[in-house]
Structures are given as structure tokens and as C-alpha cells.
Amino acid sequence: MAVFNEISPAQLMRLIGTPQCPVIVDVCIDDDFNDDPHLIPTAFRHPHTDVEGLSTRLNGRDAVIICHQGLKLSQGTAAHLRAIGLNAQILTGGNVAWRDAQLPRVPAAAIPGTTWVTRHRPKIDRIACPWLIRRFVDPDATFLFVPPASVQGVADRFGATPFDIEGTRWSHEGDSCTFDIMVREFGLSHPALDALATVVRAADTDRHDLAPQAAGLLAVSVGLSRMFREDTAQLDAGMLLYDALYRWARDGQNEGHDWPAGRA
């Protein structure tokens, strides 16, 4: 039975992908990490010996501390954080329990950096992909929106990763859109994200037969692009849109609505 300062893999998975997700910190030693270099979605690595630096990085936010098996390293780090007034839990069973539960794990080598760049005036993929990255890979990621002809130059000069641009790793591939590629490459395949990916693909590639929600997503996305002149403001609004779509995909696909009820 989990104690008061523990959270189970299933409980943590319910929080990942939502704005309520705590900061997830991996404090396992290098040898354990190098044997299986994957991260729980949104986790970052931090040495267990640097609690002071970690407390500064957390800046008062709630945290879940993870080590290899959920024992001494995570327990000790979390206890130190609680001793200085922070809310810190550990993941029951650590990375081993998460892996054994077959929950999504992000290959560390797939994470390119914290700054991304794409074409300005986004519609679907260029809002959906930043949402995916911030909710499942890197909550602190920065997104730059520039004219199409400048994407590669900005990427080269500012150390940014280009996405949703032809000829790059993170772009359309066959019938798949960029969102599909990111779900695959970041190891995020999961029933809810797979369902959401189908809707994004259908809307982004004009194949509304794939998902009845696609027409609505396209309409709202075009509407948002008309409402905001500043792309980063549109992204902020779009985060709420995709938060809602994710919760629908995770919990609400079987729910309908009819009022008054019982009409012929």
C-alpha cells in the first residue's frame, strides 16, 4: 500500500498531459540510467546530491521524485525537499515499475533541445505539436514562429530544432503528420494520444473521413488564427484547446449529448 508521500504509476499517468501535472525529477544514478536511457514523460534528470539546486529549480512547485526502484535515492531527496517546505512525493517502484506497467517512456536521445522553430501563422500541427512537447516532453520548451524562408536559418543560428517544415526530421512522413511523428519518436503511443493523433491527422491533412471531430478542429483552429495576430498568444489559447481534446480522448469519447432527451 502506498504511503502518504507516494504516488503510483497509474495515478501519475493520469496527471501527465494535464496542466495539473507536478514537476517530475529523475534522480537515478548514471549507471542505472545508461542501462535504460528513457525518461518518464516531462521528467528531467538532476543529481540527488544537489538538493539545494533542485529546490531552486522547483521554485515552490509540487514534485514527484523518481529513482531506479523508488527506494533510497528518491525517498531521501523527497524527504530533504519536504524538510524545507516543498511538496514532494516519490513514484512507487520508480522507473522499474513504470517500465513494467508498459506506460509511455521517452527515449532520452530523441529530445533535441528546449528551443523549437517553425513557420509563422500556425493552424493545426504547429499548435498541436507544441502542446504535445510541453505536456509530455519538456514543459519549459520555447517555440519560435518565423517566416517559412527563415526557419532553417533561425534554427542554425539560434540552436533551435525546426519542425513541421519539409526536409527535417520532425515533419510529415507519408500519410502521417508531424504530430504522428512526434508521438512515435518520443515513445508516447497510448490510447488517448493515439485517438487524438487521428483527429489531428484528419484535420491537418484534410481527411475528415478519418475522424468526425476533424472538421470541428479545423474550424476552431482557423478561428483562433483569425483571433490572434501574435502567434505565441495563439499558442497559449491553443494549449487550452488541446488540453480539452486530450481529456475528451482520454475520458469522454463515449459521451454524447441530447436535449430534450427522448426526441424522435
Image: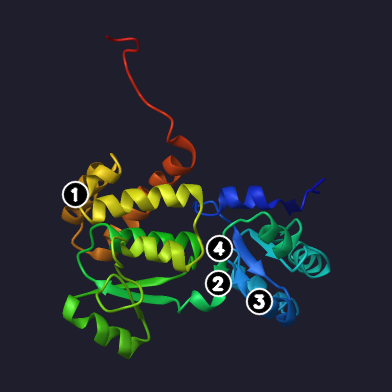
The picture places residue 165, in percent across and down from the top left corner, at 26, 74
- Do the residues bearing badges 4 and 2 touch, measured as CB atoms within 8 Å? no
Q: Which residue is mark 2?
A: 107
Labelled disc at residue 41: 4
Q: Which residue is mark 3?
A: 46
Q: Where 242 sits versus 74, above or below? A: above
Quadrant in the picture for the N terminus: top right
Circle 4 packing at 10 Å, graded few (<14), some (14-19), many (20+), is many
- Please tell me which residue lies in front, 209 or 79: 209
Q: CA distance from mark 1 to mark 3?
A: 41 Å
Badge 2 crowding class, 10 Å Cα cut-off, few under 14, some 14 to 19, many 20 or more, is: some
Badge 3 element = loop
Label 1 or label 2, whichever lies nearer to me, is: 2
Left-right relation of 43 to 166: right
Question: Amino acid type of disc 1?
Answer: Gly
Query: Of callouts 3 and 4, which one flags the residue occurring earlier in the amino acid sequence?
Result: 4
- 103 or 81, nearer to the observer: 103
Q: Earlier in the sequence, mark 1 or mark 3?
A: 3
Determine contact: label 1, label 2, CB under 8 Å: no
Give whichever of discs 4 and 2 has the lower sequence position.
4
Q: Which residue is mark 1?
A: 223
In the rendered structure, which disc, 1 or 2, sits on the residue that comes first in sequence? 2
